[in-house]
Image (tube, helix red, strand yellow):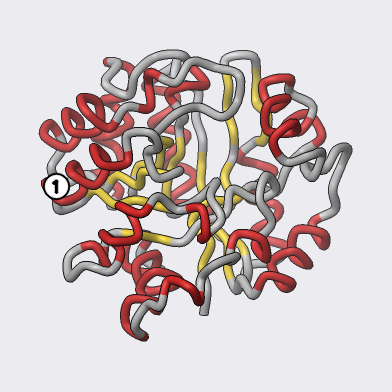
C-alpha cells in the first residue's frame, strides 16, 4: 500500500495561475493545462502505484482555486482512492474554524492545509492560531509547506526555525505535517522534527532521487523512520516520477513500509 500525503486534483483556475510559471519552466511544460477529468488523476495514481491520495483544496487571497466542495465531490466519486484535505480563508478566522469543523465532522476530511507563502505571512501570524486550536480539538493535523517557495511568492514564511518551532512550542498537541522537505533549510527542519514529537515531514515536490542527503539519513534513523511521509505534489510531479530512485535508497522493509504507508496512516488517522 502506498499513500500520497500531498496531492491536488487541479481545477483549470488553479493551473492557470501565473504564480506557477516557475514550475512550468522547471518541468519543461510537464504540468498540464485546462480542465482535467478525475479519471486522469486516478490513472496517474495507478501508473505510479499509489493506492490512496490526500487531495487538498486551495484557498488564496485572490479567491478559491480548488474549493472544499469540489474536493468533497471528488472524494465521493472515488472514496476508496481519495481523502479530503480542507483549506480555509485565513482572513476570516472564526468562519474558517466553523468551515473546518463542518468538513471534518460532516464530510470526513482528515486535515487542513494552509500555505503561508500564498498569504505572504508567516505561520505564526495571529490569524492561524484559532485554526491550530481547532485542529487540536478535532484531532486532525495541520499541513503546511516548509522551505523555499517554488511558485512566484516570497520564501521567508517557509523557514522551519523560528516558525514551525514556535508553533510546536505553543501547541504541543498539534500534529504539523511539513511538506516539501524544507530545502534549503532541511537541516533546520530535521532539527525541529527531532525536537517535537508531533512534527513530521513529507517529501512532496521532490522525486526520491533528489531528496537531500541529510533527509535520507534521517529517514533511515531509528527515530526518523517514523517521521517522514511520501508525497508527490501531483500534478506538479506525477507519482511514477516521484518514485525515481526509491530502490537506490536501500531502505529496510520496516522503514520502506512506514515511509510509503504506515506513517501516513498514523498521522492522518486512516
Which residue position is annotated with label 1? Answer: 196
Nearer to me, 173 or 101: 173
Q: State the quadrant of the C terminus.
A: bottom left
Taking the spot 65% from the left edge, 19% from the top edge, the residue there is 63
Depth order, front residue of 34/228? 228
Residue drawn at (32%, 41%), measured in percent from left and top? 186
How many marks do you count on the picture?
1
Question: Does 187 appear above or below 20?
Answer: below
Q: x%, y% of residue 182?
A: 37, 38
Seen as rendered, the residue at the extreme right is 34
Asked if residue 16 is positioned above or below residue 140 in the image, the reply reads above
- In the image, taking residue 95 as reference, residue 150 lies left or right, namely right
Residue at 25% across / 26% down in the picture? Answer: 163
* Quadrant of residue 23 within the rendered picture: top right
Quick one: SS at disc 1? loop
**Residue 98: x %, y % from top left:** 41, 32
Task: Please provide percent x and percent y for residue 41.
Answer: 75, 58
Q: Residue 90 in the image: state x and y as whole percent.
A: 44, 20
Mark 1 neighbour density, 10 Å: few (under 14) some (14–19) many (20 or more): some
Residue 236 occupies which quadrant of the picture?
top right
126 horizontally vs 38: left or right: left
Q: Classify residue 151 by image quadrant.
A: top right
Please report the residue visible at 44 percent of the width from the left and 49 percent of the height from the top.
104
- In this view of the protein, which residue sits in the foreground, 188 or 9? 188
* Above or below: residue 127 compared with residue 180: above
Indicate whether 49 appears above or below 135.
below
Depth check: give the residue in front, 65 or 238: 238
Amino acid at each position: 500500500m502506498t499513500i500520497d500525503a500531498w496531492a491536488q486534483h487541479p481545477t483549470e483556475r488553479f493551473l492557470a495561475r501565473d504564480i506557477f510559471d516557475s514550475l512550468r519552466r522547471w518541468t519543461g511544460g510537464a504540468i498540464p493545462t485546462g480542465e482535467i477529468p478525475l479519471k486522469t488523476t486516478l490513472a496517474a495514481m495507478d501508473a505510479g502505484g499509489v493506492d490512496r491520495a490526500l487531495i487538498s483544496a486551495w484557498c488564496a487571497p485572490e479567491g478559491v482555486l480548488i474549493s472544499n466542495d469540489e474536493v468533497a465531490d471528488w472524494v465521493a466519486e472515488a472514496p476508496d482512492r481519495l481523502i479530503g484535505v480542507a483549506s480555509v480563508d485565513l482572513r476570516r478566522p472564526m468562519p474558517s474554524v466553523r468551515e473546518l469543523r463542518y468538513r471534518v465532522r460532516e464530510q470526513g476530511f482528515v486535515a487542513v492545509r494552509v500555505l503561508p507563502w500564498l498569504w505572504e505571512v508567516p505561520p505564526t501570524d495571529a490569524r492561524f492560531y484559532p485554526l491550530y486550536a481547532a485542529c487540536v480539538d478535532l484531532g486532525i493535523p495541520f499541513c503546511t509547506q516548509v522551505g523555499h517557495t517554488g511558485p512566484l511568492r516570497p520564501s521567508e514564511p517557509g523557514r522551519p526555525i523560528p516558525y514551525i518551532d514556535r508553533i510546536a512550542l505553543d501547541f504541543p498537541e498539534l500534529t504539523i505535517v511539513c511538506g516539501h522537505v524544507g530545502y534549503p533549510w532541511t537541516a533546520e527542519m530535521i532539527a525541529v522534527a527531532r525536537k517535537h514529537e508531533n512534527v513530521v515531514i513529507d517529501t512532496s515536490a521532490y522525486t526520491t532521487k533528489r531528496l537531500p542527503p541529510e533527509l535520507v539519513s534521517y529517514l533511515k534513523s531509528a527515530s526518523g523512520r517514523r517521521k517522514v511521509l511520501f508525497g508527490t505534489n501531483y500534478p506538479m510531479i506525477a507519482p511514477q516520477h516521484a518514485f525515481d530512485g526509491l530502490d537506490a535508497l536501500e531502505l529496510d522493509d520496516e522503514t520502506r513500509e512506514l515511509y510509503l504507508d504506515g506513517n501516513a496512516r498514523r498521522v492522518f488517522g486512516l
